Image (spheres, helix red, strand yellow):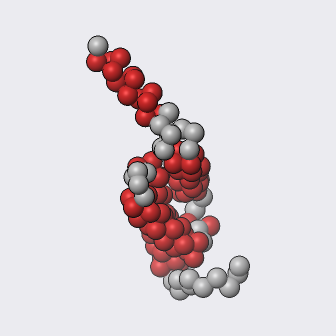
């Protein structure tokens, strides 16, 4: 039966010693989904005046680098790649909201980190 074969393949993939649920190939990306959730939560619940442009730019670079890493490692880590792909999109939306807000207010966009 096809469903038994599919169920067995899913079970074997989930318990694979190199990329199964007992490895960092699973738990690392799962923890990184909190970054995506945080960006989406902030976007839905807070105004653009709360967005830190330097931090958002840092998150964009971070996710871009880790998307490349997820593609380069063997075996390829598609869970990590998807997590950082979604985070890249969420952070770019946040960055565009902040830039638009600052432009409308006539404020210069300061990317230095003087306040940190």
Quadrant position of residue 111: bottom right
Relative depth, front residue between 35 and 115 = 35
Is 4 drawn above or below residue 30 in the view shown?
A: above
Residue in the picture at 71% in, 79% down = 116
Residue 91 in percent (x, y) is at: 49, 63
Q: Can residue 58 be seen in the rendering of this structure?
A: yes
User: Which residue corresponds to the image point at 53% horizontal and 83% vertical from the top-left?
Assistant: 109
Q: Between 13 and 78, which is closer to the camera in this rendering?
A: 13
How far across and down, in percent of the image, does residue 90 sit? Answer: 47, 58
Residue 43, above or below 110: above
For image coordinates 34% across by 24% down, the residue present is 6
Task: Name the residue at 54% across, 72% down.
Answer: 58
* Furthest-right residue in this view: 116
Q: Give the x, y percent position of residue 39.
A: 55, 57
Instruction: Tell me the quadrant of the picture where the N terminus can be found.
Output: top left
Number of numbered labels in the structure image: 0
């Amino acid at each position: 039966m096809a469903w038994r074969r599919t169920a067995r393949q899913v079970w074997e993939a989930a318990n694979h010693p190199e990329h199964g649920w007992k490895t960092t190939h699973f738990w690392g990306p799962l923890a990184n989904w909190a970054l995506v959730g945080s960006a989406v939560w902030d976007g839905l619940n807070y105004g653009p005046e709360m967005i830190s442009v330097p931090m958002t730019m840092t998150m964009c670079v971070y996710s871009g680098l880790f998307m490349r890493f997820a593609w380069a490692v063997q075996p390829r880590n598609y869970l990590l790649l998807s997590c950082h792909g979604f985070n890249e999109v969420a952070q770019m939306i946040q960055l565009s909201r902040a830039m638009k807000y600052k432009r409308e207010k006539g404020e210069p966009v300061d990317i230095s980190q003087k306040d940190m």
